[in-house]
Amino acid sequence: MPRLGVHVSSAGSIINTFERAKQVGAEVFQFFLRSPRAWKAKDISPEEVETFKKLKKSWDYIMVHAPYLLNLASQDDSLRKKSVEVFLEELKLCDLLGVDYYNFHPGTAKGISDEEGIRNIIRSLEEVFSTYTPKHTCVLFENTAGEKGDLGKNFEELKKLIEPFKDLKVGVCIDTCHAFAYGYAINTAEGFNAFKKEAESTVGIESIKAVHCNDSKVPLGGKKDRHEHIGLGYMGTQAFRLFLKDPYFSNLPYYLETPKEDDWDRKNLQTLRSIL
């Protein structure tokens, strides 16, 4: 059975994430270690670390999402260097906390070709992994929606990014909204099967470790990252039925990143459970 969960706020303390996830009925959860749009990290005390590790023993598949500011593909050396530093800092902390997955958007090729951007991402990650090899935390490359400069938008690009690190703890997190917005027709049986077949022939289906579970505010191939509540966007409920009932995808953790409005986290979880 899939584990269903949400993205929760870590405001106040990372310890608060557990109770916030519990309150909406989540079985797994994701959070940010810092504001997603800020370079500066909040201080985390040794006491918080120890408390987090104790609470973590009762939870599986906790994921941390990297800040949006990171761009490992950048041709701007100072931005790329800063991105590597923050990535490394957060990865070390994730490993210390016992976090299962560290998820990130591969990067944006601004002013350069996609090929050069991919080379920059690989070079950046070589710097990270040559400095630190995680013992527990698995690094997940998230597929993107295909907006201008987006890298990791399809399985061919994800394969190029993952291949140099296949002997390390790396994998893929599929964002359903991004996949649909890029052009994968995952809301039909035929499109979903083609999507899965492409995954199998490129990155390998076993490399997919988690799913960001979001409907889309843009139509198929709209190439914009706009999340919607489950069943209320262009994807409808069929895409989620196909994922949740699939022999492989039914064993993965799912994380909602839908708009934070009223009691919608709980409602979206109920929708997914009704599909199951």
Image (spheres, rainbow, N blue to C red):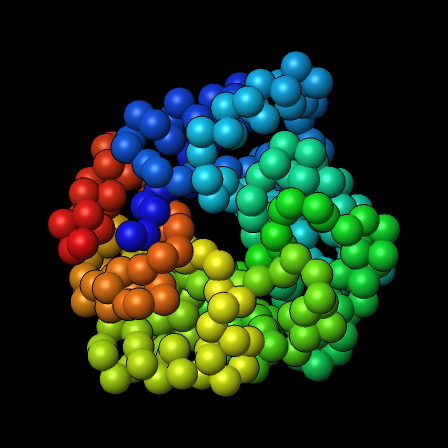
- Looking at this view, name the residue that lies furthest to the left: 274
Q: Residue furthest top?
A: 47
Is residue 240 rendered to the left or right of residue 95? left
Q: Which residue is at a point 56% across and 44% down the rendered structure image? A: 100
Q: Is residue 86 visible?
A: no
Report if residue 84 is visible in the image.
Answer: yes
Q: Position of residue 186 (x, y in %)?
A: 30, 74
In which image quadrant can residue 248 be found?
bottom left
Vertical position of residue 268 compared to residue 140: above or below:
above
Residue at 50% over, 24% down: 55
Q: Residue at x 54, y 82 (%)?
A: 202
| Relative depth, front residue between 51 and 181 | 51
Q: Is residue 44 left or right of residue 125?
A: left
In this rendering, position of residue 174 left or right of residue 150:
left
In the picture, which quadrant includes the C terminus? Answer: bottom left
* Position of 83 relative to 208 (above/below): above
Q: Foreground residue, 32 or 25? A: 25
Question: Would you place residue 156 above or below residue 66 in this image?
Answer: below
Q: Where does residue 66 sit, x and y in percent of width and height? A: 60, 47
* Residue in front for this viewpoint, 253 or 184: 253
Q: Residue at the spot x=26%, y=51% of the render? A: 229
